[in-house]
Amino acid sequence: MELTASVNWGIETIYYDSYTAINEFFETERDTISHSVYWDSIAGGSGSEDHYFSIYSNGSYGADQLDCSKDWVWNASNPSSGTETTSCGGPSPTTVSDPLPWKSQHCSVFVVTTYPNGDKDTWVRSADSTLKLHTNGVPGSTSQSIFRFNVTADYINNSTWNGYTSNPASSSVSKNLISIQGQSADAATGQIYLKFSDNSTVTITPSVSNSFYTFSAYNIVKHELRIKVNGTTLEQDQSNVTFPAGQKLYFVSNWSPALSTTSEDTFWLPTGSYVNKITDPFGDPSPIYQHDSALNNAATTQGWYYSSSASQLISVSKDVTLSNGQVINGVVGKGYIGLYKPAAQLAVGPAPTPSFHTWYSYFNSKINLGLTGVHPNPNTSMNYTINVPSTYAGKFIITQLCQLDYNILPGWSFTEWKLDGNTDEYSGPYTVQADPTNTGGFQDQPQMNAAAGTPLRVKGNFKDYIRYRPSAGISTDNIYVTLGIVTWSCHGETDSTDAIITNTITGPSNVSASSSFPTWTNEHP
């Protein structure tokens, strides 16, 4: 019968039995029995048996004549009883309370017995039990598990046994000569381990190199390969836990129930926007965030996701050596997590009106973005406010990269992107609560001064990375992930009389959603 919920797998048994028995009584008659049974533990089944006789006359048998017939119907839920209809002069249906009339077996025999008086018996029988495993699992799961089977088998020493009368002469088969799908059982325990995917149906019929034997497979156990992330066991078809992007995640796998192994080689198979190694190069270049696959070949591993996903697949593959010496490679377990990343946005408010200003004294000339007279004017500098509504607490910063073209300062003209300042916290850090409003401001005033009467040029392109780090778990183990990028540029020039001849400012742009880490060649200045 099929077993389901409590053990998370099921067995379907299919019985097939067909035999023909011919008794030839020379110079009298021939009796023939034709028997056939088919039954499925899910669909139920039926059987029939017909008896014929033929009269021997003038050196040959006449036409077969039906003497008696029987028909059976067994249902799937209770094969120990069924309905038998017999047509032998009394066709009334009779309820029988006998089990399905034979054991799990394989039979393929052809026996002819000739007696001294010329009589002859012919016995031809084919019988097979097929065991099918429904691996089950949660709907949609394609994870793999290791199944353990205990098997036994007996050789049948009486070739003309009909398969269901009292036990025939038999002898036990050595356990290591029994196999399922080509895998031999352990000689001492009779156990076989095989891997199968969830929600599939596979044949697990024990096999012996013989024409007639009975068998059984029992004590079946499903060992599931499960994944834990930061202590939470993952569901195999959908995410049941969500982490904020940037949180450090620790990955562990285990067998449920426990599996007795002597060695396990583990290979994690992370996909998506994932890094597990951060390298700080010598000098001032930006840190390098990368996914180093060599770090995935460990029993446990760790890393960070830096984008959002409603259902991010986490996979692990194992090669195991079991305590009985059997080796099974490539068992794949799967699970899903949700990944949350806030969406940064420009806060609603008066639009900035950045503009260059200049002033002159006997000693020097100066050009400044956002200056009136000698006083900074925030309303005409480059300024904006960022809002980071979030479900998870943390903090955010603004990291600014720049390309500059200043006309008289050595080292202030370059086309590569450099970090503006000596820290990635150009603005911030700003606190992020689990709240729809978490704001932080940005302001910049590019400027230059020189000897009086010197023409000046201040020109630059800027990329401002809005970066968030969650406080979940151990916050110092977490990383900043990019929420988006704001771009802007400015170009201001004066002539020798300190008159502004170029005053061009673009931006700030809206926040462009991005997950890219900022990269720079050096720090400036």
Image (cartoon, grey):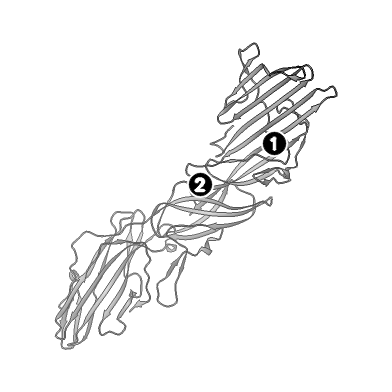
Q: Residue furthest right?
A: 116
Between 57 and 278, the one lying in front of the other is 57
- At numbered mark 2, what does the secondary structure look like: helix, strand or loop? loop
- Amino acid type at circle 2 is Thr
Between 437 and 97, the one lying in front of the other is 97
Figure quadrant of the N terminus: top right
Which tag, 2 or 1, sits closer to the chain's start?
A: 2
| Residue 294 image position (x, y, % from top left) | 53, 64
Q: Residue furthest front?
A: 58
- Circles 2 and 1, Cβ within 8 Å, touching? The answer is no
Figure quadrant of the C terminus: bottom left
| Residue 355 image position (x, y, % from top left) | 17, 72
Q: Is residue 415 left or right of residue 380?
A: right
Q: Which residue is drawn at 76% across and 21% down?
A: 24
The residue under label 1 is: 215
Residue 480 in the image: above or below residue 499: above
Q: Residue at x 15, y 88 (%)?
A: 362
Residue 142's label in the rendered image is 2
Q: In this view, does 103 lie to the left or right of 266?
A: right
Residue 497 in the image: above or below residue 168: below
